């Protein structure tokens, strides 16, 4: 997608976890999403992931926060497995894009799925391959996979990291079998916790998050790609995780009580608004 010539800035944010650089989040009028501006080049983007605190690229349990994260992740993995089982047919062939250290692939593989993963980070990919008997490939291999190969493709908090949305939606549709399912989980900048924390909202995570979605944006992207929208599912744990991390960015320390309270309040308000901190979108190949 091209950058807007005249930038309509929604909010200004900082890279709190790596570079401390400032960025703007700019409206994309075509799809209703926000774009990070300026976006790093493909050559420099990897530098912004070089942090021991980037939790999806490590299995570390160094502190209370990381231990809770991994405990909650175990619960979430079971829910993700139930979801893909509910949309699958008998062949059960899965592609997990941006699979991190491979925990979801491992769970799916142990439950009878034929698994393939894509992970650009070399260290995370190495960990994932140890867990999955070398089923995880580098990012370039995504475009070399055989068309019509997969029953389900999943992206768990990955779409916001991909530089070219049009190109990737096109390849996902090509790789799916007829009536195959695309499952996308992304943060929702319309959520209550996003409004509370504003520029400190951890799920903006610029510049690693190149795009910032609301519900309309995902549905419009699906229409453009000739994908059928099926349903939206809340990720309620994310409100607590994001609020806790946002508290750290805002005050410099983990305020567990305030973070938990804002996460609880965000989920409560989302019961009527539908605007949860993160949402899973289930799409079908038309």
Image: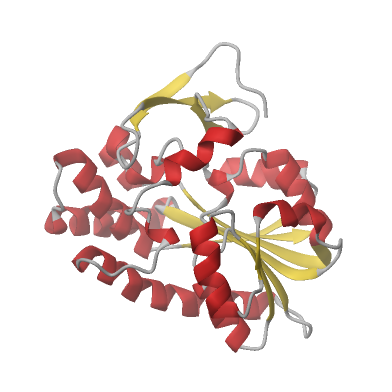
Marker count (numbered): 0
Q: Residue at x 26, y 51 (%)?
A: 245
The residue drawn where x is 14% and y is 48% is: 253
The residue sitting at the top extreme is: 6
Specify whether residue 80 is in view: no
- Residue 132 is left or right of residue 235, and the answer is right
In this picture, residue 91 sits left or right of residue 85: right
Residue 155 seen in render? yes
Q: Quadrant of residue 205?
A: top left
Decide: is 234 above or below 31. Answer: below
Q: How is the image coloured?
A: secondary structure
Identify which residue, 128 or 28, lies in the foreground.
128
Q: Compared with residue 233, is residue 130 higher up or lower down, i.e. above or below?
A: below
Give x and y (percent) for residue 273: 42, 50
Q: In the image, residue 263 lies at what x, y percent?
A: 27, 56
Identify which residue is drawn at 20% across, 47% down.
247
Percent x, y of residue 84: 63, 75
Towards the viewer: 177 or 58: 58
Q: Where is residue 174 in the image (x, y as percent from the top left)?
A: 83, 55
Q: Quadrant of residue 22?
A: top left
Residue 6, by quadrant, is top right
In the picture, the quarter occupied by the C terminus is bottom right
Quarter of the image with the N terminus in it: top right
Identified at 78% across, 67% down, the residue is 180
- Image check: 160 left or right of 249? right
164 to 155, vertically: above or below: above
């Amino acid at each position: 997608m091209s950058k807007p010539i005249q930038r309509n800035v929604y909010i200004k944010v900082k890279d709190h976890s790596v570079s401390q650089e400032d960025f703007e989040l700019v409206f994309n009028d075509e799809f209703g999403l926000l774009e990070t501006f300026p976006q790093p080049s493909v050559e420099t983007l990897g530098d912004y992931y070089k942090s021991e605190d980037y939790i999806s690229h490590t299995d570390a349990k160094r502190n209370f926060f990381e231990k809770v994260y991994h405990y909650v992740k175990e619960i979430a993995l079971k829910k993700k497995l139930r979801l893909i089982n509910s949309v699958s047919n008998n062949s059960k062939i899965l592609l997990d894009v941006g699979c991190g250290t491979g925990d979801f692939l491992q769970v799916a593989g142990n439950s009878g799925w034929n698994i393939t993963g894509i992970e650009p980070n070399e260290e995370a990919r190495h960990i994932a391959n140890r867990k999955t008997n070398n089923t995880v490939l580098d990012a370039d291999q995504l475009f070399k996979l055989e068309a019509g190969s997969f029953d389900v493709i999943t992206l768990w908090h990955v779409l916001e990291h991909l530089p070219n949305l049009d190109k990737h939606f096109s390849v996902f549709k090509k790789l799916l079998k007829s009536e195959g399912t695309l499952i996308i989980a992304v943060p929702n900048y319309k959520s209550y916790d996003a409004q509370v924390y504003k520029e400190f909202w951890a799920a903006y995570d610029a510049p690693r998050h190149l795009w910032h979605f609301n519900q309309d944006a995902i549905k419009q992207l699906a229409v453009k790609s000739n994908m059928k929208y099926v349903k939206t599912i809340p990720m309620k744990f994310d409100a607590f995780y994001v609020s806790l991390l946002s508290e750290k960015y805002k005050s410099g320390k983990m305020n567990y009580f305030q973070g938990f309270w804002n996460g609880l309040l965000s989920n409560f308000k989302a019961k009527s608004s539908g605007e949860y901190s993160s949402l899973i979108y289930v799409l079908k190949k038309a």
